[in-house]
Image: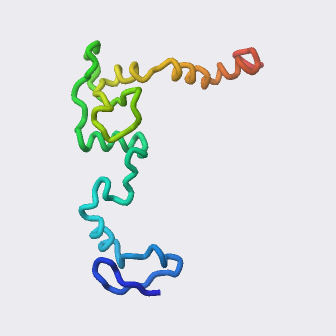
Amino acid sequence: MKKACLICTKEFHFKPYRRNRAKFCSFKCYWHSMEGRKGEENPQWKGNGAKIQSMHIWLKKHYGKPTYCMNSDCRGKSKIFDWCKKTESNYTHDRNDYLWLCRSCHRKYDWTKEKQEKAIKNLIWYRQYETTGRIYSS
C-alpha cells in the first residue's frame, strides 16, 4: 500500500495493518512534525494525570531544582532538597501546590499516621504474628 507523507509529500510504502497510523515516510519527517509541539500541544501530554516521577521532572525543568528548605523548624543539616507536594492537593502543574523541603523535612512531612500503620502491616514479622500468633514459625 502507498500513501503520501504529510511533511515532504513523498510517496511511501507501508504494511496494511498500519493503514490508519502511517503518516510519515521517515523518522526525520515525524520529528519535523513534532517541532514546536511542547506542553499541551504534544500528543503525549497527560496533563494532571501524569505520574509522580513525570511531575517532578516537569517541576525541575520549569522551576529549577530546590536550593533551600522552606520549613522554618529545619535544622539545616541536609544538603539534598526535594519538591514536596502539599498534603491537601493533588498532583498538578501549579507551582503553589508544592514546597521546597530538605530530604529530612520531606520525610517527616509525608510520614502520616496512615502511612505508618500501612508500613507496619507490611512487615513480614507483623503479618506472621497476626496469622499464627507467633513471630517466628517453628
The image shows residue 35 at horizontal and vertical percentages of 25, 64
Question: For the image shown, how many numbered marks are present on the structure?
Answer: 0
Instruction: In this rendered view, identify the residue nearer to me: 93 or 74.
Output: 93
Residue at 35% over, 76% down: 26
Residue shown at 39%/31% (left/top)?
89
Image coordinates of residue 62 in percent, x first then y, are 24, 43
Lateral position of residue 76 relative to residue 134, left or right: left
Left or right of 119: which side holds 48? left
Is 31 drawn above or below residue 91 in the view shown?
A: below
Q: Which picture quadrant has residue 97?
A: top left
Q: Is residue 99 left or right of residue 121?
A: left
- Does residue 106 sit above or below 31 in this rendering? above
Picture coordinates of residue 71 (x, y %)?
28, 18
Q: Position of residue 79 (x, y in %)?
A: 26, 24
Which color scheme is applied?
Answer: rainbow
Residue 109 placement, left or right of 75: right
Occupied quadrant, residue 123: top right
Image quarter hosting the C terminus = top right
Please name the residue shown 45% across and 73% down the image. Answer: 21
Q: Quadrant of residue 55?
A: top left
Q: Is residue 15 above or below residue 91?
A: below
Residue for point 33% across, 78% down = 6
